């Protein structure tokens, strides 16, 4: 008892001032950026498909959609680019302990990510500029490197996160990091399944979000070819992604019991080792006990261990100072899984209905669900990141470096967090205002959306506004 | 050449590339800021939209490249700089964020009122970011980042060398951007605009030159190692930068804008190189 108090006290003393605000800051900026990153990864592919359809079938509706999506992605890509730059700063500003010690281990994927960002930005610029200025087929080709670079970039960033979960490519001798092999660190054991999980998640988020926009339009009675096509293409992408995702996610978690038993125990809310382990839905971890959960026997062992008897190792097998925050991890994990399964069910229902000759797009409740599917997919995405990140605590590099050791010993970070909240809120409002004004002008029949400083727009504004006279 | 020198050379290339390419990009915002009222400034702002639209955020890749190379090659010096100079770095970061976002927002803004709001944010943050990055460079060059990190969060960048470093960064980049914009305006056949931008660029060039010379006095006192280096090892680069700067002014004055772009790049590259050369010397 006395010993555990000492341990707790010492861990409190060792915790630098910068730890909690740094974690919140990282959560805010990552959580915000990841949504835009999804757009950078998955939207180009949808634009290419739409654009190709427009060219091959000479379909003006498809061409119009591709052009609008490209403009929308320009706005979102700009704020995604800056929030990505924020992250590369924050790695050093918030986690000097991590970068000072492992910077050379982690440099390679970051360098490639920078490079792929460069390619992505350049080709998006060319693609946007190319409308009406390039032969159509060459023009659509310009979007291909953009889509490819988005995928490479995701792989690189995920490889860093996978390394934090399964560190490799170095040795520690007498407290020194030696034998650094950056390629091994980049291509660590976890990177492939984790990348696949995130890559597919990006298609779910963007597919459901974009099709949801057109579902709202249909709810408001705009049922033209434009809305139908705008719904169908992203929904098809989302369908494939939603069907594959649960299996990929399962693959990723398959050897979690050996790799990160504390994370698995928190996911499954396993207080003690039970054989067979139940699947525990809901519930809370209070004072070392599970309260209020619904248990489904056998299912825990079956899903987590692929066996009817093999148990999920309980939290009691792991020293308390190595426990992650159990409730957050458990709820985040189950939120992700729950929404993922719901979305999978929804796409199955839609396509089975369609196969049997029933168009669910005629039904208001289905359209409402589709409108909600985008935000739901975003919630699942965020919950998944919370589950894996919080579930890795108290480690920043699993079993090698504690998060507290990586943080800066510095006050004032709460101010930084407050400022960031304001700035991110401002950017969100700015993006919403601008995107809404774009859709409004498109609906009013404008095509080019000239800059307000441009010659045509100034003439138009002169009649309407007083500002010109100043 | 050992691996460390190679990484240092890569880092050095990245800093120069960011200063030249990113600098020209950023400081277009300076001309946006002084473009005047909505109507008077419209041609300049439209030109800026056209000039930086295609390159856009791409030049940030140099900054990311510098950060990544730095923390990969010299993790401890990176951590030292990050724990000491976090205030100006965060302010520069804020500038990058606001600038990138509001530039895109302005491009698609629906009304003039919106465009003016986003434009003001874009232009102001475009000027502030190079300033803060300049103070960071000044803080490092004047030896205010202790090797173990955790230096004074304020005096490390609120000092003569840093403040002049910030001003020089804004000035040189604005001169560069002005030269590019003038050349763009001429190529686009906007005669009046060319004349106006040429005049402004000349003024910026002369003022920047004056600031650089004024800065020599406080820097000699404040950062003796830096000034020793600038008059010693790096002296040829200082001379090159001065000559290239003068040549740019002369070419601008004689309406040779396309040529002026090259000398302007040379001038900025030489200034940054001289500075970097010296910084490497200090760190050795």
Image: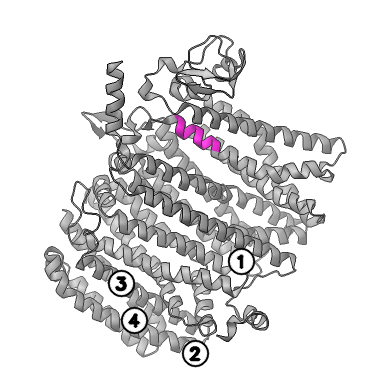
Q: Name the residue carrying label 3.
A: B268
Instruction: Note whether A360 is above or below A332 in the view shown.
Output: below
Contact check, label 1 and label 4, Cβ < 8 Å: no
Local secondary structure at mark 2: helix
Q: Is residue A321 left or right of residue B225?
A: right
Mark 4 is surrounded, within 10 Å at the Cα level, by few (under 14), some (14 to 19) or many (20 or more) other residues, namely many
Local secondary structure at mark 3: helix
Q: Name the residue carrying label 1.
A: A130
Mark pair 2, 1: CA separation? 29 Å
Q: Which mark is residue B204?
A: 4
Residue B82 lies in magenta, yes or no?
Answer: no
Residue at 76 percent across and 54 percent down: it is: A217
Question: Does label 2 or label 4 sit earlier along the sequence?
Answer: 2
Residue at 16 percent across and 57 percent down: it is: B282
Q: Which mark is residue A269?
A: none
Mark 2 or 1: in front is 2
Q: How many marks?
A: 4
Chain containing mark 2: B
Contact check, label 1 and label 3, Cβ < 8 Å: no
Residue at 67 percent across and 50 percent down: it is: A210
Magenta stretch, main secondary structure, is helix
Chain containing mark 4: B
Q: Quadrant of the C terminus of chain A?
A: bottom right
Residue A388 lies in magenta, yes or no?
Answer: yes
Chain containing mark 3: B
Q: Is residue B161 left or right of residue A81?
A: left
Mark pair 3, 4: CA separation? 14 Å
Mark pair 2, 4: CA separation? 19 Å
As rendered, which of A447 and A110 lies closer to the eye? A447
Q: Residue furthest toward the right?
A: A357
Image quarter of residue A177: top left
Question: Does label 3 or label 4 sit earlier along the sequence?
Answer: 4
């Amino acid at each position: 008892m006395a010993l555990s108090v000492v341990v707790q006290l010492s861990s409190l003393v060792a915790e630098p001032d910068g730890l909690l605000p740094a974690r919140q800051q990282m959560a805010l900026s990552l959580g915000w950026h990841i949504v835009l990153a999804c757009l950078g990864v998955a939207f180009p592919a949808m634009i290419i498909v739409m654009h190709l359809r427009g060219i091959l079938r000479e379909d003006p509706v498809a061409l119009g959609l591709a052009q609008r999506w490209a403009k929308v992605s320009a706005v979102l890509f700009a704020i995604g680019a800056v929030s990505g730059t924020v992250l590369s700063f924050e790695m050093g500003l918030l986690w000097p302990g991590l970068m000072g010690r492992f910077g050379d281990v982690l440099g390679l994927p970051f360098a490639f990510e920078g490079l792929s960002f460069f390619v992505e930005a350049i080709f998006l610029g060319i693609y946007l500029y190319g409308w009406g200025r390039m032969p159509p087929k060459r023009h659509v080709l310009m979007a291909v490197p953009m889509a490819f670079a988005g995928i490479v970039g995701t792989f690189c960033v995920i490889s860093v996160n996978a390394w934090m979960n399964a560190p490799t490519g170095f040795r520690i001798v007498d407290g020194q990091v030696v034998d650094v092999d950056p390629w091994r660190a980049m291509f660590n054991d976890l990177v492939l399944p984790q990348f696949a999980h995130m890559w597919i998640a990006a298609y779910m988020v963007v597919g459901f979000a974009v099709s949801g926009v057109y579902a709202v339009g249909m709810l408001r009675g705009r049922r033209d070819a434009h809305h139908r096509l705008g719904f169908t293409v992203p929904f098809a992408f989302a369908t494939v992604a939603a069907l594959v995702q649960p299996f990929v996610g399962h693959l990723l978690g398959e050897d979690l019991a050996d790799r990160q038993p504390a994370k698995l125990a928190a996911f499954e809310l396993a207080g003690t080792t039970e054989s067979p382990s139940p699947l525990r839905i809901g519930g809370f971890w209070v004072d070392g006990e599970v309260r209020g959960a619904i248990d489904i026997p056998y299912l825990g062992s079956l899903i987590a261990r692929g066996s009817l008897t093999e148990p999920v190792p309980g939290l009691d097998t792991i020293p308390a100072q190595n426990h992650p925050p159990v409730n957050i991890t458990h709820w985040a994990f189950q939120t992700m899984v729950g929404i993922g399964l719901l979305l999978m069910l929804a796409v199955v229902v839609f396509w089975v209905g369609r196969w049997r000759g029933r168009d669910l797009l005629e039904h208001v409740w289905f359209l409402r669900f589709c409108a909600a599917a985008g935000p739901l997919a975003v919630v699942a995405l965020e919950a998944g990141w919370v589950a894996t990140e919080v579930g890795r605590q108290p480690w920043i590099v699993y079993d090698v470096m504690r998060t507290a050791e990586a943080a800066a010993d510095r006050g004032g970070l709460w101010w930084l967090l407050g400022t960031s909240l304001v700035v991110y809120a401002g950017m969100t409002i700015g993006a919403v205002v601008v995107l809404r004004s774009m859709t409004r002008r498109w609906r009013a029949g404008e095509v080019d959306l000239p800059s307000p400083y441009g010659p045509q727009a100034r003439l138009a504004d002169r009649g309407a506004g007083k500002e010109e006279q100043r | 050449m050992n691996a460390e020198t190679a990484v240092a050379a890569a880092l050095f290339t990245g800093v120069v590339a960011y200063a030249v390419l990113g600098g020209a990009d950023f400081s277009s915002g300076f001309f946006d800021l002084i473009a005047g009222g909505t109507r008077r400034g419209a041609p300049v702002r439209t030109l800026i939209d056209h000039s930086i639209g295609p390159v856009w955020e791409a030049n940030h890749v140099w900054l990311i490249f510098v950060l990544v190379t730095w923390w990969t090659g010299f993790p401890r010096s990176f951590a030292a700089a990050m724990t000491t100079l976090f205030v100006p770095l965060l302010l520069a970061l804020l500038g990058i964020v606001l600038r990138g976002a509001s530039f895109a927002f302005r491009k698609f803004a629906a009304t003039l009122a919106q465009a003016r709001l986003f434009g003001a944010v874009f232009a102001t943050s475009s000027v502030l970011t190079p300033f803060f990055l300049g103070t960071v460079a000044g803080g490092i060059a004047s030896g205010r980042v202790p090797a173990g990190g955790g230096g004074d969060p304020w005096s490390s960048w609120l000092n003569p060398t840093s403040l002049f470093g910030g001003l020089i960064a804004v000035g040189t980049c604005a001169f560069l951007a002005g030269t590019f914009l003038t050349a763009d305006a001429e190529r686009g056949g906007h005669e009046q605009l060319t004349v106006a931008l040429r005049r402004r660029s000349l003024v910026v060039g002369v003022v920047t030159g004056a600031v650089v010379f004024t800065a020599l006095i406080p820097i000699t006192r404040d950062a003796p190692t830096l000034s020793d280096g600038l008059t010693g090892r790096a002296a040829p680069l200082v001379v090159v930068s001065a000559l290239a700067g003068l040549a740019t002014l002369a070419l601008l004055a004689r309406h040779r804008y396309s040529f002026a772009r090259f000398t302007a790049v040379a001038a900025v590259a030489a200034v940054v190189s001289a500075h970097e050369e010296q910084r490497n010397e200090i760190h050795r």
